[in-house]
Amino acid sequence: MMNAQDSTSTRPYLIRALYEWCTDNGFTPYVAVRVDDSVQVPREYVKDGEIVLNISYDATSALQLGNDFIEFKARFGGKPRDIMVPVGRVIAIYARENGQGMAFPPPVDALPDGGGAAPASSAAAVPPAAPAGAPESSADRVVQLVTPESAADVGTEESDPPRPPAGGGSRPALKRVK
């Protein structure tokens, strides 16, 4: 009998579900990826150890959202490139138009106590507080992505001071929602 600890990760299933939700609603699905040697992307587009990829039907060909890898072909600066991202390196999937989506815990090597630096981009995961008495786990956590402009519309606790928008653009940022 398989128990929860032996089961496969929910991450690839959640990525596929949110990809489908984006496309069904006419949104452009983006994935934020923490880059290391296992990630096959154009390195010239990596910033602060991360890259954001448009995985929409119009931007890709031969897209495969597998349990272990996200694979597709895309053009960068007019040059066709083969892209391969291990699912475990995906730190968020969201709709470009409204920032709604899901963030995942960063890979172990990207955590401060794991020897790497925590992600510095606006796609970094902000884990929600666990209910009292709930056991801590490394399970995927759900976080709503919002643009800085819409962050004022999301209710916050008084203990969470408002944060200024990063870069002043309309790029999505994470905001903890309770």
Image (tube, rainbow, N blue to C red):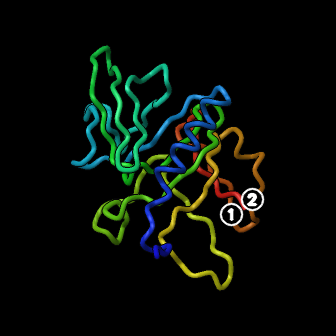
Q: Who's the residue at 71% across and 68% down the image?
A: 159
What residue do we see at 48% from left, 53% from top? Answer: 124
Q: Residues within 10 Å of mark 2 (few under 14, many from 20)?
A: some
For residue 132, which quarter of the picture?
bottom right
Q: Is residue 76 left or right of residue 138?
A: left
Please identify the quadrant where the C terminus is shown: bottom right
Which residue occupies the foreground of this view, 39 or 129? 39
Q: Secondary structure at mark 1?
A: loop
Secondary structure, mark 2, is loop
Residue tagged 1 = 160
> Relative to 59, does residue 128 appear above or below in the rendering?
below
Number of numbered discs present? 2
Residue furthest left as drawn:
37
Tell me where residue 84 appears, x and y as whole percent: 30, 38
Q: Position of residue 61 (x, y in %)?
A: 39, 22
**Percent of width and height locating residue 9:** 45, 60
Residue 63 drawn above or below residue 92: above
Residue 54, relative to residue 12: is it above or below? above
**For the point 45% across and 74% down, which residue is it?**
5
Instruction: Check disc 2 and give the amino acid type.
Output: Thr
**In this rendering, position of residue 37 left or right of residue 113:** left
Which sits in the foreground, 157 or 45? 45
Residue 130 in percent (x, y) is at 63, 74
Q: Which mark is residue 51?
A: none
Q: Is the residue marked by circle 1 packed among few (<14), some (14-19), or many (20+) residues within 10 Å? A: few
The amino acid marked with disc number 1 is Asp
164 to 96, vertically: above or below: below
Seen at 40% across and 44% down, the residue is 66
Disc 2: which residue: 156
Marks 2/1: CA distance? 6 Å
Q: Check contact, mark 2 vs mark 1: CB within 8 A.
A: yes
